[in-house]
Image (cartoon, rainbow, N blue to C red):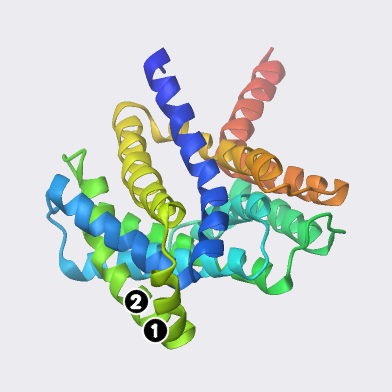
Amino acid sequence: MSLKDSLLALIIVAIWGFNFIVIAWGVEQMPPLMMGAGRFLFVGVIGCLLVKRPNIPWRWLALYALTLCFGQFALLFCAIAFGMPAGLASLVLQSQALFTIILSVLILHEAIKPAQLVAMVVAGFGLVIIGNSEQATEMTAIGFALTIASAVLWGGGNVINRKINQKGYLAGNNSAGLGLVVWSSWFAFIPFTIASFVFEGQDAILTSLQSFNLVGLGVLLYLSVCASMLGYSLWSYLLAHYPAGQVAPLTLAVPVVGLLCAMVFLDEQVTGGQWLGIFVVMLGLVINMKGEWLAQTLKHKLGSRVKG
């Protein structure tokens, strides 16, 4: 990877890691579901002026939006609003990789590999450690559960994304991935708005709008322009120029940035037990990405020694 592209990768990791701190600031300014509606309204209005609609049927845009956009972020925003520390949320959410595997087996009937099975067991054990550890920064049970549910919906969105790729809707067009994010945002904005009125109420919405300030505006701009459009466009650029196996492991650095930023900006503290759980989860994710390659390498080396 060239120096320029390595710097772009660091920018992506920084944007997505700091994103969790911005979410924590945002839920202090406005109700979480209202914030989600504002985020995807901004993505739709700004993005549709800059990005051409991809050649993807509306039903697939809607399915992608309802899982990965609305489902994932509605649960994540509510999780942080209901007491999930932002730093730990950035780590627990990475369990989406494991739920993607499970849903791919159930829905797409893809075969599960031994390394993936080991990865799920290891990472699942790490999540159990985190959930049962003593806390320096309070983590609520509902916040933890909603974050896990958010990861499940992210996994569902990944499966939908894979189906869209399998049907060839994103083939031969480097900007189609960003177009998918931008144009599906309208299907996320509508249920976010309805859910906000139903669960948060008109009074809470009006009060938040009356007290809306530059901090709230900055939060929505960061979530929409930086985290969604800029982050995803740079990610698509890297995937277009390098193998997915080289690019995908970069996401492992996102929770590292998230945890460090949470310590600095939110004064969140992580206990020894939680650090152990974090290490075990990260180990599971590494096994998921590199386990098969490691097994093949060891098999090749052992075979060479036997022959020698």
Q: Is residue 272 left or right of residue 240?
A: right
Q: Is residue 24 left or right of residue 107?
A: right
Closest to the observer, 10 or 167: 10
Residue 219 shows in the view:
yes
Pointer 2 residue: 193
Q: Residues within 10 Å of mark 1 (few under 14, many from 20)?
A: some
Closest to the observer, 73 or 279: 73
Identify residue type, mark 2.
Thr
- Residue 227, percent from left and from top: 40, 46
Please give the name of the residue rendered at 34% of the width and 34% of the height, measured from the top-left corner: 234
- Residue 97, percent from left and from top: 53, 52
Closest to the observer, 260 or 69: 260
- Residue 192, percent from left and from top: 37, 74
Q: Quadrant of residue 147?
A: bottom right
Q: Residues within 10 Å of mark 2 (few under 14, many from 20)?
A: some
The kind of secondary structure element at disc 2 is helix
Residue 166 shows in the view:
no
- Residue 255, percent from left and from top: 61, 43
Numbered-mark total = 2
Q: Is residue 179 left or right of residue 112?
A: left
Q: CA distance from mark 2 to mark 1?
A: 6 Å
Please give the name of the residue rendered at 60% of the width and 37% of the height, measured from the top-left corner: 257
The kind of secondary structure element at disc 1 is helix
The vertical placement of 181 against 242, above or below, is: below
Q: Are marks 2 and 1 in contact (CB under 8 Å)?
A: yes
Identify residue type, mark 1.
Phe
Closest to the observer, 302 or 289: 289
Pointer 1 residue: 197
Which quarter of the image is occupied by the N terminus? top left
Which quarter of the image is occupied by the C terminus? top right
The vertical placement of 235 against 193, above or below, is: above
Please give the name of the residue rendered at 68% of the width and 66% of the height, measured from the top-left corner: 83
